[in-house]
Amino acid sequence: MVQSLLVDSRKLDGFEGLHQAVHGSHVDVMQLGRGRLRGTLSHIGIGDFSFSIGTFNIGMRTQRISSDDKLIIGMLLAAERRVAHWSFDMQLNDVLVIPPLLEHDGVFHGASAYAAMRFDLDQVSSLFGGEARLSDPDTWRRRGHFRADLATGAMASRRLVRIMSHLGAHRDGLTPATADFWKRSIVECMAANVVSSLPPDDTGRLPSARRLIRRVEEYLDQAGTRPVHVSEICAAFTVSRRTLHRAFQEVFGLGPVTFLRHKRLCTIHSILRESRPGSTTVAAVAMQQGFYELGRFSQYYSMMFGERPSQTLGVTSFPLLDDGRAQADSVLSER
């Protein structure tokens, strides 16, 4: 059965719109500040997994009753004034864990923005696969607060907003074939902030690098043209990201994220060469392969193949949909 897919965004006109602040979960909301509430609320739904981003211009009191059996993990994206959840004072990009069936109490003292993902606890081992401390469901059964690293937190926040923005603008990029990739990309941003607040874990052993790489390449061959996220590989082979990175560096001299990006670029090159101009667009193919920053994608592609993707397709121009300025994302992409 094909999982349901949803991309939705709307403007808020009144605090009542925040009752669905996290898609699929009801939240009781009371306005604290004076004035007319304005804001936006955006959702991505992939089966039972949802991702939401909300913004509002006035202080709020939020309460969630203990009737929801889903795990909610949230991140504070922006705050004009103090934000507190339970007894936790939140700083920018901090991560909050709301376990299933637990009442939640939050106070936003001014204009704020947040991101939140909601899913079944039994998905944890798959979505956080390879990171033993996060793939254990017991880790998420109690409320928690993870203080974000300054650099990692800012990067994760920007990437979450960009994913939501680009999928909102290019809804055809969220297809059954790419749904798992986008879901893992969202989870990775949250996980990066959590991992950065934990002590280093150097207990993982390194299996034979070439044997592991051979198994990974067989897995990728079976996936065909579907984009595969690095966390999916970690979960499939029960290896940490650190172990996988060491194996790829030993065999290819590249990290797994770079290797997977090159593989996706090669897939795009083949698709564009086999397509007729007018039958598809560069943007559509790029989105289907998990590239949501099209300017950066064009840079990667040109560096890889010595030509613009539009030249491969046989058309004369490719309008960039963002400014393509490269961000220093090595913290997230090659950890």
Image (cartoon, rainbow, N blue to C red):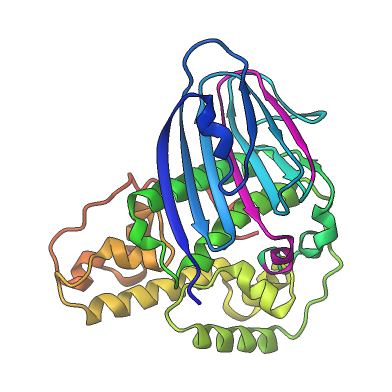
Q: Please name the residue shown 62% across and 28% down the image.
A: 29
Residue 247 placement (x, y as % from top left): 68, 77
Farthest top residue in view: 34
**Does 16 sit above or below residue 248?**
above
> Which is nearer the eye, 62 or 112?
62
Query: Is residue 96 visible to the viewer in this orientation of the structure?
Result: yes
**Does 224 sit above or below residue 192?**
below
Residue 90 placement (x, y as % from top left): 72, 30
Image quarter of the C terminus: bottom right
> Which is nearer the eye, 112 or 17?
17
Whether 108 is among the magenta residues is yes
Residue 269 placement (x, y as % from top left): 31, 75
Whether 194 is among the magenta residues is no
> Which is nearer the eye, 160 or 106?
106
Q: Please name the residue shown 51% across and 26% down the image.
A: 56
User: In screen coordinates, is 72 left or right of 79?
Assistant: right
Query: Is residue 255 visible to the viewer in this orientation of the structure?
Result: no
User: In screen coordinates, is 131 left or right of 25?
Assistant: right
Report the magenta residues as a range.
Answer: 102-126
Q: Please name the residue shown 80% across and 43% down the image.
A: 144
User: In screen coordinates, is 309 left or right of 161?
Assistant: left
